[in-house]
Image (cartoon, grey):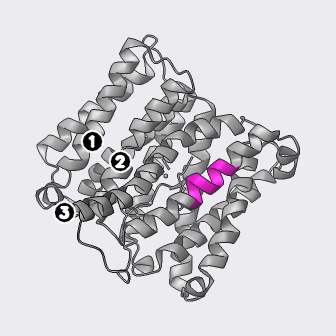
Amino acid sequence: MTVTAARRAWLTDLPVLLVAVVWGSSYLAAKGVTTGQTVLAVLVLRFAVVLPVLVVTGWRRLRALNGPQLRGAGLLGLILAAIFVLETYGVVHTSATNAGLIISLTMVLTPVAESRLNGTRLPRPFVAAAGLSVLGVVLLTQGAGFSEPSLGDLLMLGAALARTVHVLAMSRMRSVRGADAMSLTTVQLGGAVLVFAVLCAVPGTGATPWAAAAGFGAADWAWLLYLSVFCTLFAFFVQMWAVRRTSPSRVSLLLGTEPVWAAVVGIALAGDRPGPLGLLGVVLILAGTAWGRTAADPAARKAPVRADAPAREDAPVRNDAPVREDAPVRDEAAVREGAPVRNDAPVRDEAAVP
């Protein structure tokens, strides 16, 4: 690779790596602005900032969606809403480190579920990697001594399962195949916000968006805007931009570092102290998910993509793969989440975005 090509590849990789860092820090941001009584209100406010931008930016393509595509995206939006609710309640009741690492199990759960649906056998290295990740979660959640996992840990595990369902639904729903990724993301987020607003109106579900907003201080608004602007809008548009200039596999590799940054932010900034067993769990989860990503797709590992080969500007982005739910769905590319890009490319849900 020439010096010029290497520089061009680095300039493409850096924004994608920043997305992984932003997603890794999103769990701390969510804890900073959310309480058990404001989860639904914060979700409404967060995406109320995002949706108008997505609608205005992609209005022409949004209008081109047909009936089946709209219904399919609406159904995916219901799953996305479940992911965000589980994630955000989970973050409130556990540490930022635990949240970011447990949700990363989506990278292991998705190939397992897909193999069961397809009736295929997983490679032995992947099974070993999955076992390593599960052991890591056990040690992480039991770092202070073996006891029942916390409510937050269980909710994050539920969010990881919901993300897996979202990824598989996107890849198998014929109605959304070939549809514009940005338009699908917009409809999904719109459907999710509608669910949040309806739940907010149910007595006993916490503060209304207006009441929560009225009680926000400067720090709360800063966290909220960080989640909206960086964890969602910035993440989504960077993925859309990068996947046209490099390969989905390269984007997936970089976004797959999200749990590393979640652990770094949680331990360094949030003051999380997992303990010796918990730290061993962190290492096992990171090693297991990284190993599992490569073991599940040996073909991609054997055929690296040239970083100096520019992608076509008109190359369509596939939407049969996941995007982080918290960031609008990548054309999954998972992804903690939030919203979604392919699973082999990585869209946080969200996302998940939390």
What x and y, as percent, mark residue 233?
58, 61
Residue appearing at x 55%, y 53% in the figure: 326
Tell me the element at label 3. loop
Magenta region includes residue 232: yes
Residue closer to the observer: 283 or 85:
283
Whether residue 184 is in magenta: the answer is no
Q: Classify residue 238 as left or right of residue 270.
A: left
Quadrant containing the N terminus is bottom left
| Image-quadrant location for residue 320 | bottom left
SS at badge 1: helix
User: How many badges with numbers are in the image?
Assistant: 3
Task: Give the answer, above or below, for where 169 lies relative to 58.
Answer: above
> Separation of disc 2 and disc 3 at Cα?
26 Å
Please state which amino acid type lies under the numbered disc 3.
Thr
The image quarter containing residue 145 is top left
Q: Position of residue 105 (x, y in %)?
A: 37, 41
Kindly tell me whether residue 189 is visible in this rendering: yes
Q: Which residues are magenta?
A: 225-233
Q: Which residue in the structure is indicated by mark 2?
A: 256
Query: Are the two marked residues, 1 and 2, in contact with CB atoms closer than 8 angstroms?
Result: yes
Can residue 330 be spotted in the picture?
no
